[in-house]
Image (cartoon, helix red, strand yellow):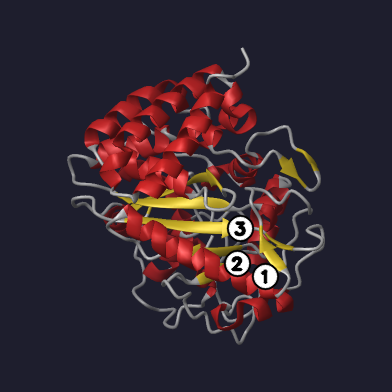
């Protein structure tokens, strides 16, 4: 989720969509941008806590004051949203989680340096206000609670509520790590898409950090992933890794119900059951525009989301600077088609085991074997990333530590 998408379009009548065929063609045209891979990006999200008592709720005004000029307008109407010194804008999620979205870089080392600088700067801002960043994918201390009172998030909460408790958990208590990789050339894009998807269960398990929520054990290695998958399956379950990604994504977007329809008032609720296909066929309160379709796409939350590039969204937030480890794994795997292909082959046997990975983590034999192979591939490919010797050594040590866990699983 991105709070920056809270805006109402300035030109509501901008290019009306005339029918499903036009809408499908538009989605197909933007979901993959082909070309030689060159960029790597990441978004880091954290829960926020009071340093002296992490169980206390976060007050929006307190958090806004801590962020100062970097505060987004969704948190405070006077927020200026000035990017952090290394270029990352700050967004705030419905439960008060903070997120930084780094500008993509060509060199992994440059990306790590810039994100680390902004992470340290943000930590300093919060520390001055008695606040700290969390270190897990799910708030381990507090029950989920929405503190952002915006039309988008109010509509989302109301839409998700009939489906169970997972929606408010995802919105108000989860924190993830997102890695963005280029879609690739026309020849390599199918491989990269399939690998990004199939790698999900092993990497969910290897980097799970959310076994505890609201003060108690959840029974899941990644309770965050459990909440995301269960929020609204039509928009949160993965696309088939072996499907035609363009066709599958077009169908997903058009046949998923509309979450909210922006307007001048505070109530953005969409008519019950309205899909975008229904809307473009005349079933909504007004004809939809291309801007409405873009906004609808932003309300799809599958583990891998094609947005011209591939948003890999299935990782839990990591403690401290350990976000560098899964980032390096994905950069290494997608840095060479031969490594990508080998990783895909290793993960295919468990490519659909999302819930099992979220629940059992590396205690599952098949998932642990796939994860071990991916980590081995990453260690061997790591030198090609051009990291400093210190970062290379630190990441390699962490990969060996996780690899050892894959060998100590239960039968």
Q: Quadrant of the N terminus?
A: bottom right
The disc, 2 or 3, on the residue closer to the chain's N-terminal end is 3
User: In screen coordinates, is 293 left or right of 155?
Assistant: left
Q: Is residue 98 above or below residue 34?
A: below
- Residue 410 in view: yes
Q: Is the C-beta separation of discs 1 and 3 under 8 Å?
A: no
Q: Residue at x 72, y 49 (%)?
A: 162
Decide which of tag 1 and tag 3 comes sooner along the chain: 3
Question: What is the tally of numbered marks visible in this picture?
Answer: 3
Quadrant hosting residue 194: top left
The residue that label 3 is drawn on is 46
Contact (CB < 8 A) between labels 1 and 2? yes
Query: Where is mark 1, residue-wise?
Result: 127
Residue at the (65%, 44%) spot, across then down: 227
Towards the viewer: 283 or 111: 111
Percent from the top left, x then y, of residue 21? Answer: 31, 54
Disc number for residue 119 = none
């Amino acid at each position: 989720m991105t709070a920056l998408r809270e805006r109402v379009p300035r030109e509501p009548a901008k290019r009306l969509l005339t029918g499903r065929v036009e809408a499908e063609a538009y989605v197909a045209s933007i979901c993959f941008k082909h070309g030689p891979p060159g960029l790597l990006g990441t978004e880091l999200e954290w829960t926020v806590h009071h340093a002296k008592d992490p169980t206390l709720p976060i007050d929006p005004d307190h958090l806004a004051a801590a962020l100062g000029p970097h505060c987004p307008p969704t948190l405070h109407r006077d927020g200026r949203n000035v990017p952090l010194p290394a270029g990352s804008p700050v967004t705030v999620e419905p439960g008060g989680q903070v997120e930084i979205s780094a500008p993509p870089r060509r060199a992994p080392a440059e990306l790590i340096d810039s994100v680390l600088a902004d992470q340290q700067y943000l930590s300093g801002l919060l520390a001055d206000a008695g606040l700290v960043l969390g270190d897990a994918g799910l708030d381990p201390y507090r029950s989920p609670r929405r503190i952002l009172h915006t039309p988008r998030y109010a509509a989302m909460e109301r839409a998700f509520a009939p489906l169970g408790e997972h929606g408010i958990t995802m919105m108000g208590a989860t924190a993830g790590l997102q890695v963005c990789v280029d879609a690739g050339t026309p020849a390599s894009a199918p491989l990269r898409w399939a690998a990004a998807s199939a790698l999900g269960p092993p990497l969910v398990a290897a980097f799970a950090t959310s076994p505890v929520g609201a003060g108690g054990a959840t029974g899941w290695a990644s309770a965050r992933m459990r909440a995301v998958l269960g929020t609204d399956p039509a928009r949160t379950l993965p696309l088939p890794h072996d499907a035609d990604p363009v066709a599958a994504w077009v169908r997903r977007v058009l046949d998923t119900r509309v979450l909210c329809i922006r307007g001048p008032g505070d109530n953005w609720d969409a008519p019950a059951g309205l899909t975008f296909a229904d809307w473009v066929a005349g079933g909504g309160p007004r004809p939809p525009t291309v801007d409405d379709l873009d906004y609808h796409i932003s309300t799809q939350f599958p583990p891998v989301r094609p947005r011209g590039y591939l948003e890999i969204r299935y990782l839990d937030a990591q403690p401290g600077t350990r976000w560098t480890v899964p980032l390096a794994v994905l950069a290494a795997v997608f840095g060479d088609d031969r490594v990508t292909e080998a990783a895909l082959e290793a993960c295919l046997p468990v490519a659909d085991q999302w819930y099992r990975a979220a629940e059992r983590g590396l205690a599952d034999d098949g998932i642990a074997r796939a994860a071990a192979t991916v980590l081995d591939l990453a260690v061997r490919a790591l030198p090609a990333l051009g990291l400093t010797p210190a970062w290379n050594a630190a990441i390699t040590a962490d990969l060996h530590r996780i690899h050892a866990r894959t060998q100590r699983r239960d039968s």
